[in-house]
């Protein structure tokens, strides 16, 4: 059992080594080198384009803009509230009131 395990392990390592030598042999041949470099360049270009899209377009659309907050120093006195704006006013809720007639 141990011998067969050792044989299978050495066969697996031999396959790994032959795969690495195939790549180095491919890169050594000038004409075949482009069969390795061109697809690798394409994959890297797609990855760079995806990263650019993610950072330039996807992320900014996901960031919520927070309202600006204005603060001031507190002083004693009457409180006056006012608000200005443009747009359409919409009620937060509707309350039905029934009027009772008295005679």
Image (cartoon, rainbow, N blue to C red):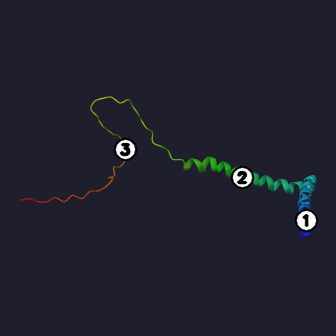
Q: Which mark is residue 85?
A: none
The alpha-carbon separation of the residues under discs 1 and 3 comes to 80 Å
Q: Earlier in the sequence, mark 1 or mark 3?
A: 1
In which quadrant is the N terminus drawn?
bottom right
Q: Which mark is residue 6?
A: 1
Task: Tell me if 99 is positioned left or right of 29 in this view.
Answer: left
Q: Earlier in the sequence, mark 2 or mark 1?
A: 1
In contact (CB < 8 Å): disc 1 and disc 3: no
- In the rendered image of this protein, does residue 35 appear above or below residue 78? below
Which of 20 and 9 lies nearest the eye of the viewer?
9
Q: Which mark is residue 47?
A: 2
Q: Residue furthest bottom?
A: 1
Which of 7 and 52 lies nearest the eye of the viewer?
7
* x, y percent for residue 29: 93, 54
The residue located at (76%, 55%) in the rendering is: 43
User: How many numbered discs sit on the rendered protein?
Assistant: 3
Q: Which residue position is annotated with label 3? A: 86
* x, y percent for residue 52: 66, 48
Helix, strand or loop status at disc 1:
helix
In contact (CB < 8 Å): disc 2 and disc 1: no
The residue located at (90%, 53%) in the rendering is: 27
The quarter of the displayed image where residue 94 is located: bottom left
Q: Label 1 crowding class (10 Å Cα cut-off): few <14, some 14-19, many 20+?
A: few
**Which circle, 2 or 3, is nearer the viewer?**
2
In which quadrant is the C terminus drawn?
bottom left
In contact (CB < 8 Å): disc 2 and disc 3: no
The residue located at (55%, 50%) in the rendering is: 62
Q: Label 2 crowding class (10 Å Cα cut-off): few <14, some 14-19, many 20+?
A: few
**Which circle, 1 or 3, is nearer the viewer?**
1
- In the rendered image of this protein, does residue 22 appear above or below residue 3? above
Task: Tell me if 39 is positioned left or right of 17 in this view.
Answer: left
């Amino acid at each position: 059992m141990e011998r067969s395990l050792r044989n299978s392990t050495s066969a697996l390592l031999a396959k790994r080594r032959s795969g690495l030598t195939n790549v180095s042999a491919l890169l050594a041949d000038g004409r075949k080198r482009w069969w390795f470099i061109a697809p690798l360049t394409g994959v890297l270009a797609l990855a760079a384009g995806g990263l650019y899209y993610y950072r330039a377009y996807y992320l900014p659309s996901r960031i919520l803009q927070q309202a600006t907050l204005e603060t001031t120093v507190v002083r004693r006195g009457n409180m006056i509230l006012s608000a200005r704006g443009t747009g359409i006013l919409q009620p937060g809720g509707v309350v039905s009131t029934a009027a009772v007639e008295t005679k």
